[in-house]
Amino acid sequence: MGNFPSRFQDAEAPASIDRRRQAVMDRLTEAFSSDALDMEEYERRASAANIASTTLDLDLLVADLDLSRPKPVASPGRRTASDVSDRRGGPEQTVACIMGERTLSGDWLTSDRVSTFTLMGNTQIDLRDVSLPAGPTRIDIFTLMGETVIMVPRDLPVRMTATPVMAEARLNRDVNGNTRDADTWIEVGGMVVMGSLVVKTV
């Protein structure tokens, strides 16, 4: 049959592109939340990332946003007490989901502050296997016409201060809402517009 053209030989695996796409979306969301990008530019780049077909196309969308900054990488197995304490006061962890589904599970947390952006999608945040630092861990939610679900252990207290706008933001009845005198707890803030935010135990 002979050799295929190089563009077929060099075709990238879809899984590799999807992983890079999600990393780029997280980087864009981080830049937007820190005012490095305005809404118009964020939307333009996010739309381009959703249709990009190569990792090169994706990399070009964040080439000016300090790609050299290393991101924390979760190590295998349970983290040590030192690893967990290092999360206190570290860089805010950002998560984006646009017209899709995003699930965070396992010991994924790298900071005591998490910012999520969900647009017409579904984000699931699972805290059941996360090693939390002492004190509060803040999760700021912005959900627009989508759904964010936070799953917590039964003994983990949660305080909800998120603002719903033509939406719902609630703790299920079996979630511990008493953070007084707790050593470790979750604070959920932010805004939900025409969507839902639910904290539940599983």
Image (spheres, rainbow, N blue to C red):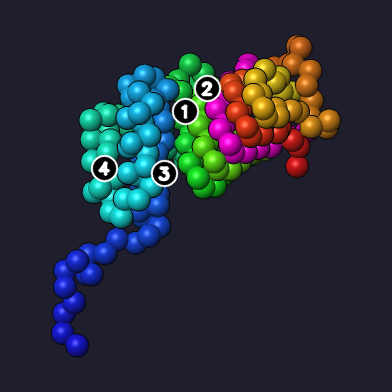
Sequence order check: which comes first, mark 3 or mark 2? 3
Q: What residue is disc 4 on?
A: 59
Sequence order check: which comes first, mark 4 or mark 2? 4
Q: Which mark is residue 26?
A: none
Alpha carbon of mark 3 to alpha carbon of mark 4: how far? Answer: 12 Å
Q: What residue is disc 3 on?
A: 22
Q: Amino acid at mark 3?
A: Gln
Q: What residue is disc 2 on?
A: 113
Residue 190: x percent and y percent?
58, 21
Eyeballing the image, is 136 above or below 8? above
Q: State the count of labels.
A: 4
Q: What residue is disc 1 on?
A: 93
Indicate the secondary structure of the residue bearing disc 4. helix
Looking at the rendering, the stretch of residues picked out in magenta corresponds to: 133-154
Between disc 3 and disc 2, the foreground one is 3
Q: Residue at x 79, y 25 (%)?
A: 176
Indicate the secondary structure of the residue bearing disc 3. helix
Q: Amino acid at mark 4?
A: Asp
Eyeballing the image, is 121 above or below 42? below
User: Looking at this rendering, what residue extends furthest in the right direction?
Assistant: 173
Residue 47: x percent and y percent?
37, 42
Residue 18: x percent and y percent?
40, 52
| Towards the viewer: 61 or 132 | 61
Q: CB under 8 Å between callouts 1 and 4?
A: no
Eyeballing the image, is 163 above or below 93? above
Between disc 4 and disc 2, the foreground one is 4
Q: Amino acid at mark 1?
A: Gln
Picture quarter with the N terminus: bottom left
Q: Residue at x 27, y 38 (%)?
A: 61
Picture quarter with the C terminus: top right
Q: CB under 8 Å between callouts 1 and 2?
A: yes
Residue 88: x percent and y percent?
51, 18
